[in-house]
Amino acid sequence: MDRRQFLRTGTHASLAALIFGSGSPQAQAAPSSGRKIPWQNWSGYLKATPSGRAAPRDEDQLAELLKNASQTIRPVGAGHSFTPLVPTDGTILSLRNFRGLKSHDPEKLTATFGAGTKIGHVGEPLHGIGQMLANMPDIDEQSLAGAMNTGTHGTGENLGALHAYVTGLTLVTPEGEVMKCSKDDNAEVFDAARVGLGALGVVTEYTFQNIASSRMRRESWIAKLDDLIDGFDELSAKHHSFEFYYIPFSDYGLAIAIDPTDEPLTPPRVETDNESAEELRMLRDYLGWWPGMRRWLMNTVAKDHPREVAVTEWYNAFPSERAVRFNEMEYHMDRQHLLPTLKKVRMLVEKHHNEVYFPCEVRVVDGKSDDAMLSPFYKHDSASIAIHRYFEDDPLPYFQTIEPIYQDLGAVPHWGKMHTLDASTFAQRYPRWQEFLDIRAELDPRGIMLNEHLRTVFGV
C-alpha cells in the first residue's frame, strides 16, 4: 500500500484497536493441587505464584474455606485490573461456579446474577427477559465481582457507575457468615461491599435495578479537539452516553455517542486485529523525531475519517473487546475540573512523551446519589481521564509525569488502575474512609483478605 493508505489504515485501525478491538486474554482459575500455577493479569504487568487455587462449588464450601483459612485468600476475576489487587503467595479464589442469571422480577425490572458472571454474559439473558443494565462499562470481559469491587463505570451525564444500580448482594465473610445485604438489611455493610476491593469477604451474587430493554444507536466521528472540548457539556447533555478520545500529536479527537432508538438493526461493526496498533507504533517510530510532520500526517488522516453509525441491541453498543494489551492509569475528579485538566495532560504528553500513541479517554459519571463508601464518584458529579501505555513498554515514566496533575484537585484513582496513593491520602479524600476500615476490621479480624497492596491501601 502507498504511504497515505498505510497512514490511514494504521491510524484508524489503531484507534479502533483501543476502542473497538477484538479478542482478550483472561486469567484462568484452576482447582487447588500440589503444583503451583503462575498467574498474571490481562496486560502481563502483574504476576504471582500462589501456593494454592480454589474454586468452591457453593456458598457453604466457600464459607468453610474462608473460615478455616490460615493464609491470604484473594478473589480473582478476569484479571483486568492493573493494580495488584490479586497477587498473593497464598490462595487465589475463582468464582467460576457462581455464574449466570439466578432470578428476576418482571414488574420491578430487577435481576440477580452470580458474581462470577462476565459482563459480556449478562446482556443476552437480560434482553431475553426485557431488561437492560442502566449503564454498562466498555470492557465486558470483566466479571461482575471484579467490576463492582473496583468501581468500574461507563459514561453518561445522568448515568451512575455500575455499582450504583445494585440493590442487593450476598457476602460470605472471612468468618464464614453468609450475609444478605441491601438498604434494608445490613445497610452499612451494603454501603461498604458495593465497592469493597475484595477486602470484606467474597460476594457471590448481585441484584441489579434495570430498565426496559432497548436498541441503541452508536455514532462515532472525528472532530477538532478544540471543538470537542468547547462542545463537551452540550454533547454530554444531549446524549444518553457520550465520551471522546484525545488523539496525541494531532489536533483531533474521536467522539462516541450512544442513544436509545427504534431504528432497524444494522450489520455488526467490523472488528480490527492486533496488527493495527503495531502500524501506528511504526508511524510513531518513523516520525517521533519530527513532531511537526507527525502532527501534519495525523491531522491529514483524521480529517478524512467518515462518521460511522451502528444500530444494535444495547449489550453490543457499549462494550469494546480489547485486542491490544496496555497498562492504564485513570483518575476521577470533580466535573468542573475535567476540561482544564485535559488541556494540561495534553500539554505534558506532547512536551515530554513522544513515545505515546494510545488515545486518552474522557468520560463523565453522575455520582450525586452514589453512597457506596469507597466509590470514587461518592456524592458528586464526576469526570475521568484515562491514559494508556502499550503493554510491552514501561508505563511508569509516562504515568509519573501525569499523576501529579491530579493531586491538587483532590482526585482519586480508579481502584483497578495504576496509581501511587496510600492510606493517608485516601483518608483525606474519602468521607467514609474510617467507617469502611472499621467494617473491614470487624468482618476480617484475621486479615486473610489482605495482600501487600491492600495493606498499603488501608494502612494495616
Image: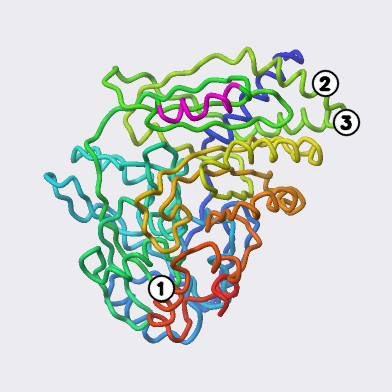
The segment highlighted magenta reads 227-237
Which of the 4 image quadrants contains residue 107?
A: top left
Pointer 1: residues within 10 angstroms few (<14), some, or many (20+)?
Answer: many
- Dominant secondary structure of the residues highlighted in magenta in the image: helix
Quarter occupied by the N terminus: top right
* Residue 347 drawn above or below residue 56: above
Q: Which mark is residue 200?
A: 1
Dot 3 lies on which element?
loop
Find out whether residue 78 is within the magenta segment. no
Going by the numbered disc 1, the residue's amino acid type is Leu
Quickly name the residue at label 3: 289
User: Mark 1: which secondary structure?
Assistant: loop
Q: Are marks 3 and 1 in contact (CB under 8 Å)?
A: no
Distance between the alpha carbons at the discs numbered 3 and 1: 50 Å
- Say which amino acid is labelled 2: Met
Find numbered disc 2 in the image and state the secondary structure of the residue it sits on: helix
189 versus 358 height, above or below = below
Marks 1/2: CA distance? Answer: 53 Å
Tell me the crowding category of disc 2: few under 14, some 14 to 19, or many 20 or more residues within 10 angstroms, Cα based: few
Q: Is residue 132 left or right of residue 253?
A: left
The residue at the point 63 percent across, 61 percent down is: 46
Residue 91: image x %, image y %? 49, 75
Q: Nearer the viewer, residue 61 or 227?
A: 227
Figure quadrant of residue 112: bottom left
Q: Name the residue that disc number 2 marks.
A: 293
Q: Are marks 2 and 3 in contact (CB under 8 Å)?
A: no
Residue shown at the point (18%, 54%) measured from the top left = 103
Choose the circle earlier in sequence order: 3 or 1: 1
